[in-house]
Image (tube, grey):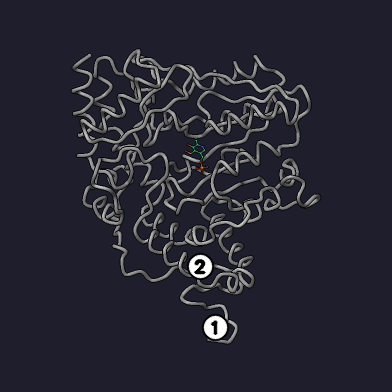
């Protein structure tokens, strides 16, 4: 080891001089995941494989957790790496940060950029998607007074608030449009969504900015972002994309979606510690987002578009281990498995009287996250009661969602450690509940 590399090798965490990449520790705890060479749909039903995955997650046995949409439980290897880095960062303190933080973050950005298939100069790390998206919405600078900014009922609450706030900040007119509501006999189709956006654009011809949520947190609907964005761009409308729930859950390429401004987190479906997000700006569009609170005027760097303050460095530094674990499974296989687990309850639920599944079965429009509503049960109070009943009487954790214009619903979100038995437990509960209607 040269004196240079020795200097950069501190307590098991190597900050490589050139790349600035934090090496992952060798961990004794990890159970290797041997992936058979079969198609994603075959692997989705290979319980032996998914049991090997599940062994890597330490999950409560107090309840069957089908509410994995809030954030993702870290795998044990990632958790241990995060704990190790927390101890290390705390111990080294500024002896690390003052010398090596810049190159460490450069290395982390490079790895995340490779994972997202975008340029390193097109992203900055954030604490989550909210922070990234609010910076994009608040700092998008191509709006003129009187323009319309469009968002939908199925967008995330904090981003809806940010879009409404643009009325004060930019003197624009925020307009909320409500997605068509599926019925029991007629699930939403891609055509429904495209014509919904076409109608919304026609009705609001001054629209210049559109917020899209790739996979929304209320019903799990995946929208055809590339097609909507192409339609928007042909009308000179820019799109800000909320990809908080799609990265890691759905296999897609940011560049192919055609969106220039995207907010992401890595702590839901990629499995990073809480506090890991990304702001992405197409490198040709960086100037269309103001530098953050005019902090560094004239800068053309994405990193000047956000100010996260002193972040939880250990969480960000655990990203390489997170990606290593994630890549052992892959997004495609995660997506197929989640859709399979989802099908185990949805196929049964579709035929239950008095219950409507709100998310379509078309595989381009859904992954793991899906919501249902008992017919006519639209209030928050009633859905809270249903969520509580599922938990206390049947031992199944779900969550009540208040967002869709047509009323509240119950969201069901399995994860990689869930088994078909977990899904059957939910089905048994729904059979009992609907039999009483
Ligand atoms: C659609 C959507 N957007 C954004 C967020 C916020 O993400 P974060 O926790 O990373 O700020 C969430 C979180 O649940 C979400 O579901």
Image position of 192 (left or right of 371): right
Q: Residue at x 41, y 27 (%)?
A: 401
Where is residue 155 shown, x and y percent of the image? 53, 29
Image position of 304 (left or right of 222): right
Q: Quadrant of the C terminus?
A: top left
Q: Mark 2 points at which residue?
A: 90
Image position of 124 (left or right of 286): left
Where is residue 322 shown, x and y percent of the image? 43, 57
Where is residue 174 shown, x and y percent of the image? 66, 23
Residue furthest right in the image: 298
Where is residue 234 shown, x and y percent of the image? 68, 27
Q: Which residue is drawn at 63% across and 40% down?
A: 261
Q: Name the residue under label 1.
A: 6
Query: Mark 2, mark 1: which one is toward the viewer?
Result: 2
Q: Residue at x 49, y 42 (%)?
A: 252
Q: In the displayed structure, would residue 375 be above or below residue 412? A: above
SS category of the residue bearing label 1:
helix
């Amino acid at each position: 080891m040269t004196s240079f590399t020795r200097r950069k090798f501190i307590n098991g965490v190597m900050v490589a001089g050139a790349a600035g990449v934090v090496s992952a520790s060798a961990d004794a705890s990890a159970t290797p995941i041997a992936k058979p060479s079969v198609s994603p749909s075959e692997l989705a039903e290979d319980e032996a494989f998914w049991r090997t995955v599940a062994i890597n997650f330490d999950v409560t046995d107090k309840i069957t957790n089908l509410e994995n949409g809030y954030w993702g439980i870290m795998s044990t290897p990632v958790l241990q790496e995060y704990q190790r880095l927390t101890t290390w960062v705390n111990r080294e303190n500024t002896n690390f940060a003052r010398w090596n933080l810049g190159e460490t973050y450069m290395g982390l950005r490079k790895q995340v950029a490779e994972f997202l298939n975008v340029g390193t100069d097109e992203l900055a790390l954030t604490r989550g998607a909210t922070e990234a998206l609010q910076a994009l919405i608040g700092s998008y600078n191509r709006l003129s007074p009187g323009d319309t900014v469009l968002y939908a009922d199925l967008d995330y609450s904090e981003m809806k608030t940010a879009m409404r706030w643009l009325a004060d900040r930019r003197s624009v007119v925020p307009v909320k449009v409500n997605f068509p509501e599926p019925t029991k006999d007629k699930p939403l189709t891609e055509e429904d969504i495209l014509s919904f956006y076409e109608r919304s654009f026609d009705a609001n011809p001054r629209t210049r900015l559109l917020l899209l949520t790739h996979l929304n947190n209320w019903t799990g609907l995946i929208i055809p972002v590339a097609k909507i964005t192409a339609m928007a761009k042909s009308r000179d409308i820019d799109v800000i994309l909320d990809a908080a729930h799609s990265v890691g859950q759905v296999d897609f390429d940011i560049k192919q979606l055609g969106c220039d401004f995207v907010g992401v987190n890595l702590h839901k479906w990629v499995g990073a510690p809480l506090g890991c997000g990304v702001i992405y700006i197409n490198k040709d569009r960086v100037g269309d987002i103001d530098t953050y609170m005019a902090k560094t005027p004239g800068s053309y760097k994405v990193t000047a578009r956000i100010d996260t303050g002193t972040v939880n460095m250990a969480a960000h530094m655990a990203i390489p281990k997170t990606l290593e674990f994630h890549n052992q499974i892959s997004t495609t296989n995660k997506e197929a498995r989640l859709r399979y687990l989802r099908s185990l309850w949805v196929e049964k639920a579709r035929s239950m009287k008095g219950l409507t599944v709100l998310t379509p079965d078309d595989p381009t429009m859904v992954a793991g996250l899906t919501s249902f509503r008992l017919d006519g049960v639209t209030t928050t109070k009633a859905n809270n009661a249903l969520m509580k009943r599922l938990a206390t009487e049947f031992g199944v954790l779900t969550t009540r969602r208040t967002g869709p214009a047509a009323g509240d619903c119950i969201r069901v979100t399995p994860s990689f450690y869930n088994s078909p038995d977990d899904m059957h437990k939910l089905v048994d509960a729904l059979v009992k509940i609907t039999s009483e209607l």
